Image (spheres, rainbow, N blue to C red):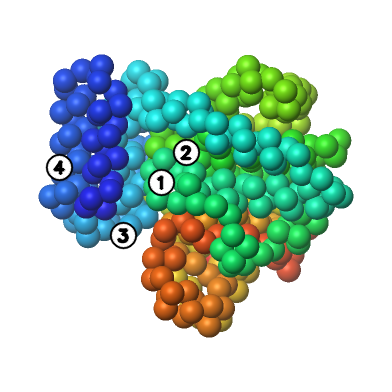
């Protein structure tokens, strides 16, 4: 928080040299305030998220940048960065230059081509695409340490890919909570396309409504990526055509919402999100920050299973995540001890990953969950 996060703010200034001086000064002041452990500012307009952030600020009286709860403070950085960069006034994404560099990389197209070439039965292809989506999560522009690592079988610490693929095969209502744009989103869309091969399937892709974590996907990033696929042509162009047809036919929907960049855990989701997720056939949760939002950004006690942390969602949920933070549940204690002995940074360096499936006891497809159900966790 004292080193990496302020550098992200200053990198934003460097990547946007045409920002007005006042905007650059505001961003630099934010970075300096974090380094100096100043109190978190009171949320100010503009922004569609002022009520949610005002409630969170009231629940964290006197919090400072280096002393606050990590999830709350980290999300607050990006909220303040968007205000300093005047995103809500100009509709200019401060992270667009970094996203453009990632979109132009051959790595994206190489990985997408490999994913689209997966063979075997439908469930085998779905499992292969889940694997591609998992390791695509290493490509995170706010945390680049693991982006160039090669996939190794031993890096997958929990492997529920086959069970998750079996759930996706035949699922009719799939809710995907997206993470990063660029390489990861391209692979996620390949998975979505495979799910939509079943004519009964409907997919909702939940994305951010505000720039956050540098590379997290906005609705505009989805369309920008699809345009790049169209221009690329070949298998990527064919993928774009199928996805666009699914969108135009109402089988693929985008659901941007300020909740996904806000400070609340998923059990405190607003009613419309709780209801949508609770009625899903399968929920696919992508990435580290979304995983933290599901399990409360906690290190759960030894012996806890993933259902203990995610069962409140009321629908089958598959979390696909490379580890970039301490939060975790469902890892065998002996495995954690051996990993700690080999390299204590395994919990945060993005090299390891999990694909964890939770199937609640009650998975009736028409279950109507509400805010009060989530809040009663």
Contact (Cβ within 8 Å) of mark 2 with mark 1: no
Contact (Cβ within 8 Å) of mark 2 with mark 4: no
Report the Cα–Cα distance between label 2 and label 4: 24 Å
Label annotation for residue 144: 1
User: What SS does tag 3 mark?
Assistant: loop
Viewer-side label of 3, 4? 4
Report the Cα–Cα distance between label 3 and label 4: 19 Å
Give the residue pinned by disc 2.
216
Give the residue pinned by disc 4.
32
Say if 86 sits above or below 373 in the image: above
Viewer-side label of 3, 1? 1
Mark 3 vs 4, N-terminal side: 4
Expressed as whole percent of the image width and height from the top left, the position of residue 214 reads: 39, 37
- Residue at the spot 46% in from the left edge and 80% down from the top edge: 337
Report the Cα–Cα distance between label 2 and label 1: 13 Å
Mark 3 vs 1, N-terminal side: 3
User: What SS does tag 1 mark?
Assistant: helix
Label annotation for residue 69: 3
């Amino acid at each position: 928080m004292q080193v990496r996060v302020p550098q992200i703010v200053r990198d934003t200034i460097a990547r946007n040299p045409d920002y007005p001086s006042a905007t650059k000064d505001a961003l630099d002041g934010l970075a300096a305030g974090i380094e100096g452990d100043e109190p978190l500012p009171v949320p100010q307009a503009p922004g569609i998220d002022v009520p949610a952030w005002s409630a969170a600020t009231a629940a964290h009286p006197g919090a400072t940048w280096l002393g606050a709860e990590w999830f709350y403070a980290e999300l607050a950085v990006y909220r303040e960065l968007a205000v300093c960069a005047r995103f809500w006034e100009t509709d200019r994404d401060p992270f667009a230059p970094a996203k453009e560099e990632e979109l132009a990389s051959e790595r994206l197209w190489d990985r997408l081509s490999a994913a689209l070439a997966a063979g075997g039965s439908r469930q085998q292809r779905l499992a292969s695409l889940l694997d591609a989506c998992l390791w695509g999560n290493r490509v995170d522009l706010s945390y680049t340490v693991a982006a160039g690592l090669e996939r190794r079988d031993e890096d997958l610490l929990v492997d529920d890919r086959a069970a998750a693929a079996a759930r996706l095969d035949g699922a009719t209502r799939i809710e995907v909570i997206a993470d990063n744009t660029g390489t990861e989103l391209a692979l996620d869309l390949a998975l979505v396309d495979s799910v939509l091969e079943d004519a009964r399937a409907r997919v909702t892709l939940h994305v951010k409504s505000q720039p956050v974590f540098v590379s997290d996907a906005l609705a505009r990033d989805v369309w920008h990526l699809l345009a790049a696929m169209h221009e690329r042509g070949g298998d990527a162009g064919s993928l774009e055509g199928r996805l666009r047809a699914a969108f135009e036919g109402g089988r693929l929907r985008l659901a941007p919402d300020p909740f996904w960049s806000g400070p609340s855990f998923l059990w405190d989701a607003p009613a419309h999100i709780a209801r949508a997720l609770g009625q899903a056939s399968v929920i696919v949760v992508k990435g580290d920050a979304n995983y933290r939002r599901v399990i409360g950004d906690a290190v759960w006690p030894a012996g806890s299973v993933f259902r203990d942390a995610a069962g409140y969602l009321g629908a089958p949920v598959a979390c696909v995540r490379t580890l970039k933070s301490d939060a975790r549940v469902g890892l065998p204690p002996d495995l954690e001890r051996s990993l700690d002995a080999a390299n204590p940074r395994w919990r945060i360096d993005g090299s390891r990953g999990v694909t964890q499936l939770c199937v609640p006891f009650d998975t009736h497809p028409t279950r109507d969950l509400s805010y009060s159900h989530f809040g009663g966790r």
